[in-house]
């Protein structure tokens, strides 16, 4: 068994393969056995590394979020007005479309979190917290520069993220009459009305 583990692919490769399978075949096709075949490992070896499918899904989400976090960090410190960077944040947040693999995974992890242990729930909260902190900082910057009207950045971020989550779920599940372009339009209209009024 030690030799098999030594030849096993790196965890990042396994997590990337899991995300690829979700994108190509859907979450229901992601089993330990199917993933094992994809990366040349037995399901037993995968369980050795990840302990359970719940842990595999959470690790895959953390890996995917790490990549998004890097992208989010670049856009938030980039050039442009606070509003332009806020629009970029929204673009990054909202799913690409029906069955977006990242959002499909998020929805599954959220669903399973009802029975998750405290450690897993803390890890999910850390992911949420990173998005929230970045949004609060961006809103505070816009307020301090006079680009946005004076709002409480933390309260506004909580409300905006709730709006984004609701719309994003509609896009991710393919709710008829709701597509990404419509959602982006609704959110930008909301931001115009609530942040730019009276500036």
Image (spheres, grey):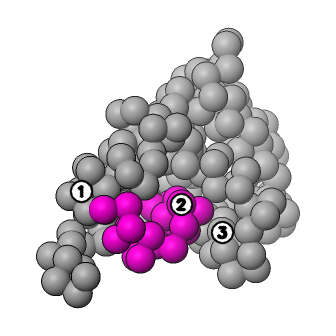
First in sequence, mark 2 or 3: give its number: 2
- Mark 1 / mark 2, whichever is N-terminal: 1
Label 2 Cα neighbours within 10 Å, binned few <14 / some 14-19 / many ≥20: some
Q: Residue at x 78, y 49 (%)?
A: 162
Q: CA distance from mark 1 to mark 3?
A: 26 Å
Viewport quadrant of the N terminus: bottom left
Q: Secondary structure at mark 1?
A: helix
Asked if residue 80 can be seen in this view, the reply is no
Q: Nearer the viewer, residue 66 or 112?
A: 112
Q: Is residue 72 above or below residue 126?
A: above
Identify residue for label 1.
39
The crowding category of the residue bearing disc 3, from other C-alpha atoms within 10 Å (few below 14, some 14 to 19, many at least 20), is: some
Q: Which mark, residue 124? A: 3
Mark 2 and mark 3: Cα distance apart in space: 16 Å
Label 2 vs label 3, nearer the camera: 2
Pinpoint residue 75: horizontal percent, then vertical percent.
Answer: 41, 59
Q: Which residues are magenta?
A: 42-61
Q: Residue at the location (59% across, 33% down)?
A: 172
Reply above or below: 23 against 62. Answer: above
Counting from the top left corner in percent of width and height, residue 95 is at 53, 38
Label 1, residues with CA under 10 Å away: few <14, some 14-19, many ≥20? some
Pointer 2: what residue?
53
Q: Nearer the viewer, residue 46 or 120?
A: 46
Q: Residue at x 51, y 32 (%)?
A: 99
Q: Is residue 55 magenta?
A: yes
User: Element under label 3?
Assistant: helix
Where residue 110 sits: x, y (%)? 70, 54
Task: Mark 1 and mark 3 in contact? Answer it, CB < 8 Å.
Answer: no
């Amino acid at each position: 068994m030690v030799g098999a583990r030594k030849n096993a692919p790196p965890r990042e490769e396994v997590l990337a393969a899991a995300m690829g399978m979700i994108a190509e075949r859907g979450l229901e096709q992601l089993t330990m056995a199917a993933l094992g075949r994809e990366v040349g490992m037995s399901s037993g070896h995968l369980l050795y590394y990840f302990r359970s499918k719940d842990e595999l899904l959470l690790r895959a989400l953390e890996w995917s979020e790490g990549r998004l976090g890097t992208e989010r960090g670049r856009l938030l410190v980039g050039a442009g007005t606070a509003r332009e960077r806020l629009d970029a944040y929204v673009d990054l947040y909202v799913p690409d479309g029906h069955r977006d693999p990242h959002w499909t995974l998020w929805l599954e992890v959220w669903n399973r979190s009802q029975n998750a242990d405290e450690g897993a729930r803390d890890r999910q909260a850390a992911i949420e917290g990173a998005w929230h902190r970045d949004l609060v900082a961006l809103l505070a910057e816009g307020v301090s520069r006079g680009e946005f009207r004076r709002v409480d950045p933390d309260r506004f971020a909580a409300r905006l993220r709730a709006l984004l989550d609701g719309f994003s779920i509609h896009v991710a599940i393919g709710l008829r009459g709701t597509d990404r372009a419509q959602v982006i339009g609704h959110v930008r209209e909301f931001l115009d009305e609530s942040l730019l009024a009276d500036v």
